[in-house]
């Protein structure tokens, strides 16, 4: 009986030490018996786009580096799937104070860095305050963290400047990865208030990792290749991939050809055309999924800029006139149309706007009610950017065609971002346009900026004063740290903006992935592109 009890305790201890990447939604390796046949080739080659210049977590802001950071470092919380809420990773327990101004975290037992150093609360405090004080692009993630207390080696207390219901999601962001502070300091890192000028660790962290993750960074050749190898001191349960070679290949045709020939295993930047080239091949699996990037129509509420589209009745007519099914066809497989201001896949999202919402006759009636029975002409400045490879000019052409059905004559005016479009867009002086929004961090609160008084809301002259009921949701949702309460408020906010306001979400952009079927666990991830810690070899 004692032997059985001892064996049970050993098994329970082993389960308690399962790594962040091995939650109920992130299975561990496919087999750990020596009798299991090990894959002959335990190296996986990944191709993704460029557009970044650092792998120092404190400066990481672009889309692609989080794949590498997530493999080499770990965070207090993590998204184990592409939907829902963040889950504890390095954290064992957490609790908000009654006034939601403090977040107390207890770290899991047995966490070690790749160096073998144990992780303590000081490492967490150092890492987060370094991000805040570096004042780089991602420092805003820590804006609501006023200070951090570490009463003991396992306890971290975040003192907030205000209640922040998105704080758990923010802590999943790549820049908030926890560094081995002992070694980081040895290589020039500092969390002091003058870190923006005094920190000299970036060059080292571009070529070396100081995390607790499943892999370590062993090589980085800018614009060419990144190599990750298994962390021999990993404290958790690893997958059976021993090495990743990440090739920087922005061109989707190159990715398609190298995947087809077997030179790479995962292609992260495919297009509709390149996906079609690979369809039907036995050894290649294809994935199309909606990202959190969304395209929208903006109608300025100030009549001096928006003219007729400032009229709420005209705005509603435009909502009814857009052919959502046709927009999805143009954007490609995997495109969806958000119900309102919140993309599908976010906590609290109400799903999609029905494609049969389009009603041209109802739109014509609304135009007549607004005093435009014969329609009107209007300029639409459109910039030279693309949304996940979809040109905004292509979206604008579709909107032009749709609005012609209700006698709105749209004159598309090409206006390069660098030639003034960006300035006018941010200053709120564009009257009518098609634009896109890529989320800064994976949390529904990022969409609150589209509300009256929000950063994006003000770009359409939607002020808190002219719509206080909508503006009030910003603070209500930000203060709601209970997920059930926040979900209810988010759903209510979407209903209020379903047919109201100057923004119309017309397309949640798709992403396309291709991978070799010798792999298991490959899935698109908004935070990490692909979570390499969940991929196994069959």
Image (cartoon, grey):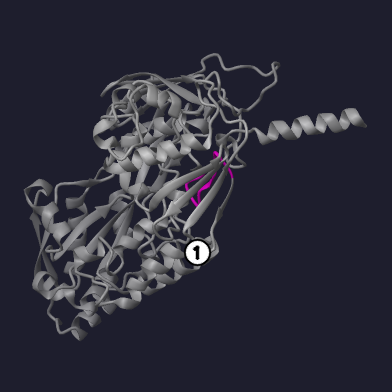
Return the residue nearer the eye: 536 or 409: 536
> What is the quadrant of residue 338 in the picture?
bottom left
- Left or right: 387 with respect to 384? right
> For the point 51% across and 31% down, which residue is it?
533
Q: Mark 1: which secondary structure?
A: loop
- Left or right: 465 with respect to 340? left
> What is the quadrant of residue 312 in the picture?
bottom left
- Residue 8 in the magenta stretch? The answer is no
> For the point 57% across and 17% down, which residue is it?
39
Residue 457 locus on image (x, y percent):
25, 65
Name the residue carrying label 1.
99
State which quarter of the image contains the N terminus: top right
Residue 343 locus on image (x, y percent):
39, 57
> For the point 10% across and 69% down, which residue is it?
305
Observer able to see residue 382: yes
Residue with the most extreme front position: 151
- Left or right: 256 with respect to 280? left
> What is the quadrant of residue 216 in the picture?
top left
- Residue 81 in the magenta stretch? The answer is yes
Observer able to see residue 528: no
Residue with the most extreme top position: 40
* Residue 517 sits above or below residue 359 on the image: above
* Residue 286 sits above or below residue 81 on the image: above
State which quarter of the image contains the C terminus: top right
Return the residue nearer the eye: 239 or 374: 239
Residue 207 locus on image (x, y percent):
34, 21
* Residue 417 sits above or below residue 304 on the image: above
Q: Report the span colored magenta.
A: 80-92
């Amino acid at each position: 009986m004692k032997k059985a009890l001892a064996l049970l305790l050993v098994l329970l201890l082993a389960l308690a030490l399962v790594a962040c990447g091995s939650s109920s939604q992130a299975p561990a390796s496919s087999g750990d018996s020596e009798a299991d046949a090990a894959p002959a080739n335990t190296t996986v080659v990944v191709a993704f786009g460029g557009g970044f210049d650092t792998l120092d977590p404190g400066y990481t802001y672009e889309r692609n580096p989080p794949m590498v950071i997530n493999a080499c470092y770990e965070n207090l919380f993590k998204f184990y799937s592409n939907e829902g809420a963040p889950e504890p990773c390095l954290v064992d327990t957490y609790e908000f104070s009654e006034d939601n101004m403090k977040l107390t975290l207890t770290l899991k037992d047995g966490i070690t860095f790749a160096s073998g150093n144990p992780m303590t609360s000081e490492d967490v405090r150092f890492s987060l305050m370094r991000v805040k004080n570096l004042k780089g692009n991602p420092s805003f993630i820590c804006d609501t963290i006023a200070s951090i207390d570490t009463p003991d080696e396992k306890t971290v207390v975040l003192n907030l400047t205000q209640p922040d219901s998105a704080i758990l999601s923010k802590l999943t962001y790549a820049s908030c990865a926890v560094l081995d502070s002992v070694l980081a300091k040895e290589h020039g890192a500092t969390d002091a208030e003058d870190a923006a000028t005094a920190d000299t660790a970036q060059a080292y962290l571009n070529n070396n990792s100081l995390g607790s993750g499943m892999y370590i960074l062993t090589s980085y050749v800018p614009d060419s290749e990144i190599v990750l190898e298994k962390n021999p001191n990993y404290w958790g349960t690893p997958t059976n991939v021993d090495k990743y070679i990440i090739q920087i290949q922005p061109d989707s045709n190159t990715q398609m050809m190298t995947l087809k020939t077997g030179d790479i295993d995962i292609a992260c930047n495919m297009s509709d055309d390149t996906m079609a080239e690979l369809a039907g091949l036995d050894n290649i699996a294809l994935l199309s999924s909606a990202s959190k990037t969304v395209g929208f129509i903006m109608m300025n509420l100030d009549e001096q800029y928006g003219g007729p589209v400032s009229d709420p009745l005209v705005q509603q007519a435009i909502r009814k006139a857009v052919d959502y099914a046709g927009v999805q066809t143009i954007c490609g497989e995997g495109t969806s149309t958000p119900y309102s201001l919140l993309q599908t896949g976010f906590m609290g999202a109400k799903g999609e706007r029905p494609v049969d919402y389009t009603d041209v006759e109802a739109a014509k009636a609304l135009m007549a009610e607004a005093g435009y029975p014969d329609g009107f002409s209007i300029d639409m400045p459109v910039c030279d950017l693309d949304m996940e490879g979809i040109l905004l000019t292509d979206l604008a052409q579709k909107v032009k065609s749709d609005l012609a059905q209700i006698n709105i004559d749209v004159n598309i005016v090409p206006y390069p971002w660098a030639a003034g479009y960006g300035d006018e867009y941010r200053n709120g002086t564009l009257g009518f346009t098609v634009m896109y929004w890529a989320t800064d961090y994976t949390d529904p609160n990022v969409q609150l900026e589209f509300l009256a008084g929000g950063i994006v809301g003000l770009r359409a002259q939607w002020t808190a004063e002219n719509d206080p009921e909508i503006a009030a949701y910003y603070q209500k949702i930000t203060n709601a740290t209970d997920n059930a309460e926040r979900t209810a408020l988010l759903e209510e906010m979407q209903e209020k903006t379903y047919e109201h306001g100057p923004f119309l979400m017309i397309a949640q952009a798709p992403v396309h992935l291709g991978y070799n079927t010798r792999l298991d666990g490959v899935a698109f991830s908004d935070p990490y592109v692909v979570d390499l810690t969940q991929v196994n070899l069959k």
